[in-house]
Amino acid sequence: MRRPLVALLVAGVLVGCAPPRSGSLGPAPTAAPETATPGATPPAPAPVTPATGEPATSGPRSPRPAPPPVTDAPTTAGAVTVELWFVRDGRLVPTRRTRPSTLATSRLALTELAAGPTAGEAATGMTTLLPAGTEPLGVSGGVATVRLAAVGGDPRTDRLRRGQVVWTLTQFSTVRRVRFDPPVAAADAPVGRADYADLLPPIVVTGPTVGQRVTSPLTVTGTADVFEATVSLRVLDAGGREIATAFTTASCGSGCRGDYRAVVTWRAAREQAGTVEVYEVSANDGSRVNVVRVPVRLAPAR
């Protein structure tokens, strides 16, 4: 009499574990769970202040609570590496910075974002649309409030600017969405990465980054939305000669974005400039399309 019940429970577990068929937007930020300590005094509510920089309305508007100050978790070893999303050819592209540790890594990230790309990054076409003066006002419940130093203008440019902020700040575990102050048009609902996913190029390379010194074997990572999810790559030496190739399959493709990871090896007798190219092979003529070129330093073989 107990076997039918056991079989039913096992079947339920198997169905519940079926893998999702959705795509990826890259590393998904998660908010730390909020737990209460038994017997602890509940925290005092955040002070309420009138919202500023919002369009006037015909009726009364409820004031917005002021978010707590931005205080991201401290880092170790005296340094912190932040991911920055710049603009290239009208699309969002990532790079990284390593700076001295600070408690306010969100503020550091926005400051670096406004400062713009390095000379090496700018040589690849990267730029920033974020002006100096943009600042995080606080984080509450996984939502960061950011005051933009410049708003309006060309809608496409303004959207790219906001996309830079959203994709940069949501790398932190405490931030899942961003609310802009002043708000976007009449709506001030928080936005996340999915709201700006269409601004990504077909292939995004998250590692290596421009100017990085790399050794063999090298792991190349990123996200892609390409034909049959197939991502190809090659390594070129200082003379532009191909010294290694590889390919991999993204976790989703042909209409959805998936994560990819590939390992490539090469032999170099001396340290030299090099290039990692990640691309899609055209289904029409076999040519390389959607190419992303990352200039690097190739370390010699050991």
Image (cartoon, grey):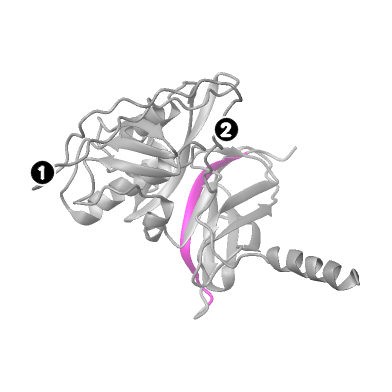
Residue extending furthest toward the front: 1
Q: In the image, residue 270 lies at what x, y percent? A: 65, 38
Query: Is 99 contained in the magenta span?
Result: no
- Residues shaded magenta: 286-298
Q: Quadrant of residue 119?
A: top left
The residue at 56%/44% (across/down) is 208
The residue at 61%/25% (across/down) is 38
Helix or strand or loop: what does disc 2 sit on?
A: loop
Q: Is residue 250 left or right of residue 120?
A: right
Q: Is residue 222 left or right of residue 58?
A: right
Q: Nearer the viewer, residue 106 or 176?
A: 176
Q: Is residue 290 visible?
A: yes
Three-letter amino acid code at the position of disc 2 = Thr
Query: Residue beneath label 2, please?
Result: 35
The image shows residue 22, relative to residue 167, as above or below, that is below
Residue extending furthest toward the bottom: 284
Q: Is residue 247 left or right of residue 115?
A: right
The image shows residue 24, relative to residue 79, as above or below, that is below
Q: Residues within 10 Å of mark 1 (few under 14, many from 20)?
A: few
Q: Residues within 10 Å of mark 2 (few under 14, many from 20)?
A: few
Q: Quadrant of residue 86?
A: top left
Q: In the image, residue 225 lies at what x, y percent? A: 50, 65
Q: First in sequence, mark 1 or 2: give its number.
A: 2
Q: Nearer the viewer, residue 298 or 184?
A: 184
Please identify the dominant SS of the magenta region: strand
The residues tagged by marks 1 and 2 sit, at their Cα atoms, a distance apart of 38 Å
The residue at 34%/30% (across/down) is 67
Query: Is 297 contained in the magenta span?
Result: yes
Q: In the image, residue 258 lies at what x, y percent? A: 56, 61
Query: Residue beneath label 1, please?
Result: 56
Three-letter amino acid code at the position of disc 1 = Ala
Q: Indicate the quadrant containing the C terminus: top left, top right, bottom left or bottom right.
A: top right
